[in-house]
């Protein structure tokens, strides 16, 4: 078995370096001498042997070369084949040249050498047929070799082109798979950030409130501590659900959590508009809810606002959500930078062809727009 495996490796290496099976090479290496030894002249015989050796050396070197050396080698092979045809009537090296031309990657080079090969092969075969009697009894083989020389380059070129396209497609699919994994990791990272961020913000606010009330209103402080415990359990449960199956959030559910968060922060709020999306927009619903969560987290943690207004508008071609507060606004609002959570929101919205617009004037106004028509078509695919 080891001997067979070793032989298989040798054959594979031979094919990679020459392009053909060693058995075909053995046959084609012996065949030309049958024609050469038909001549009684010693010098002509030596000349023929040298031509055969030169052809095989040129073929092997050309097959393993790159750039212009390939075309020089092909020219040498064509010249040797013409000489063998005119002096000895041997026309079967054109089969090797036809196979080699089919291996050319550049379309212009393939067309050029193919256009040269066909008339040279036909003229050489005709001359050899009318000159050498040995070919007249090999007419069927001569015709078959001519047809093979015409078809082999095209077939080989097409097959290799298809293989290269398949390799490129496989490489592209691999890259797409890697990008999908990367996008999924980023999405999970954002989901974890947004989910835990909201809950931890609520825990921090209620803990501070409980610390202030512990000396003034013991019973109220106990209630706040219980709510902290409940929020912590809720965060743990939501985290487990998120890791387990990345459950899609709905805007309706998120609105209720937003109300609890704003209540806990002591921020007066108003929420207007319909926030129940159809099932066809479930992915958009999830992303919008996560963006709303992050927007309200920013209001609670950074704005120092006393009021917050959330407006949800559903139109035939677009859904828009506006989150406004009367807080301190964003510093340097003329050149607003997307950092942290804002960058995550922007990336989420871009995934569903949405946009994020931020204005800072006597507070902050954040507007999310999602084209429902475009998204519906994509989700339906």
Image (cartoon, rainbow, N blue to C red):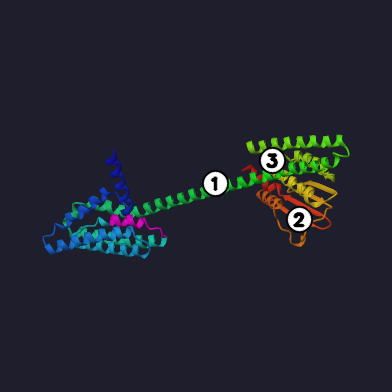
* SS category of the residue bearing label 2: strand
Q: Specify the quadrant of the image occupied by residue 287.
A: top right
Residue 138 image offset from top left, x and y in percent? 20, 51
For the residues labelled 2 and 3, say whether their Cβ atoms are less than 8 Å apart.
Answer: no
* SS category of the residue bearing label 1: helix
Disc number for residue 358: 2
In which quadrant of the rendered image does the C terminus lie?
A: top right
Sequence order check: which comes first, mark 1 or mark 3?
1
Closer to the camera in the image, 99 or 117: 99
In which quadrant of the rendered image does the N terminus lie?
A: top left
Where does label 1 land, which residue?
Answer: 177
Q: Is residue 224 magenta?
A: no
Tell me if residue 173 comes above or below residue 82 in the rendering.
Answer: above
Where does label 3 land, which residue?
Answer: 282
Tell me if residue 350 comes above or below residue 85 in the rendering.
Answer: above
For the residues labelled 1 and 3, say whether their Cβ atoms are less than 8 Å apart.
Answer: no
Sequence order check: which comes first, mark 1 or mark 2?
1
Q: Residue furthest front?
A: 215
Callout 1 crowding tier (Cα within 10 Å): few <14, some 14–19, many ≥20: few
Q: Which residues are magenta?
A: 94-106
Residue 338 image offset from top left, x and y in percent? 70, 56
Measure how far apart labels 1 and 2 are at the Cα level. 33 Å
């Amino acid at each position: 078995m080891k001997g067979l495996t070793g032989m298989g490796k040798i054959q594979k290496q031979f094919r990679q370096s020459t392009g053909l099976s060693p058995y075909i090479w053995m046959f084609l290496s012996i065949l030309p001498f049958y024609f050469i030894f038909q001549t009684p002249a010693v010098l002509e015989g030596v000349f023929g042997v040298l031509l055969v050796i030169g052809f095989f050396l040129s073929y092997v070197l050309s097959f393993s070369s790159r750039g212009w050396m390939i075309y020089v080698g092909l020219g040498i092979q064509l010249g040797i084949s013409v000489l063998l045809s005119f002096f000895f009537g041997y026309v079967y090296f054109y089969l090797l040249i036809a196979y080699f031309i089919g291996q050319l990657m550049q379309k212009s080079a393939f067309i050029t050498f193919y256009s040269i090969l066909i008339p040279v092969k036909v003229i050489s075969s005709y001359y050899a047929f009318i000159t050498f009697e040995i070919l007249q009894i090999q007419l069927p083989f001569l015709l078959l070799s001519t047809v093979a020389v015409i078809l082999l380059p095209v077939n080989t070129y097409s097959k290799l082109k298809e293989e290269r396209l398949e390799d490129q497609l496989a490489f592209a699919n691999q890259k797409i798979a890697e990008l999908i994994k990367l996008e999924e990791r980023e999405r999970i990272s954002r989901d974890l950030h947004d989910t835990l961020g909201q809950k931890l913000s609520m825990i921090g606010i209620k803990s501070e409130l409980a610390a202030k009330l512990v000396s003034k209103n013991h019973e109220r402080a106990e209630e706040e501590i219980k709510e902290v415990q409940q929020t912590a359990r809720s965060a743990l449960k939501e985290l487990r659900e998120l890791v387990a199956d990345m459950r899609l959030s709905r805007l309706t559910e998120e609105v209720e959590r937003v109300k609890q968060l704003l209540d806990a922060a002591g921020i007066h709020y108003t929420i207007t508009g319909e926030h129940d999306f159809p099932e066809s927009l479930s992915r958009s619903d999830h992303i919008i809810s996560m963006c709303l969560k992050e927007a309200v987290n920013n209001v609670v943690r950074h704005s120092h606002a006393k009021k917050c207004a959330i407006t949800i508008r559903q139109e035939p071609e677009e859904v828009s959500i506006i989150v406004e507060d009367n807080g301190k606004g964003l510093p340097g609002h003329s050149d607003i930078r997307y950092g942290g959570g804002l960058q995550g929101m922007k990336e989420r919205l871009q995934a569903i062809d949405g946009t994020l617009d931020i204005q800072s004037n006597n507070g902050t106004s954040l507007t999310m727009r999602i084209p429902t028509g475009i998204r519906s078509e994509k989700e339906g695919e």
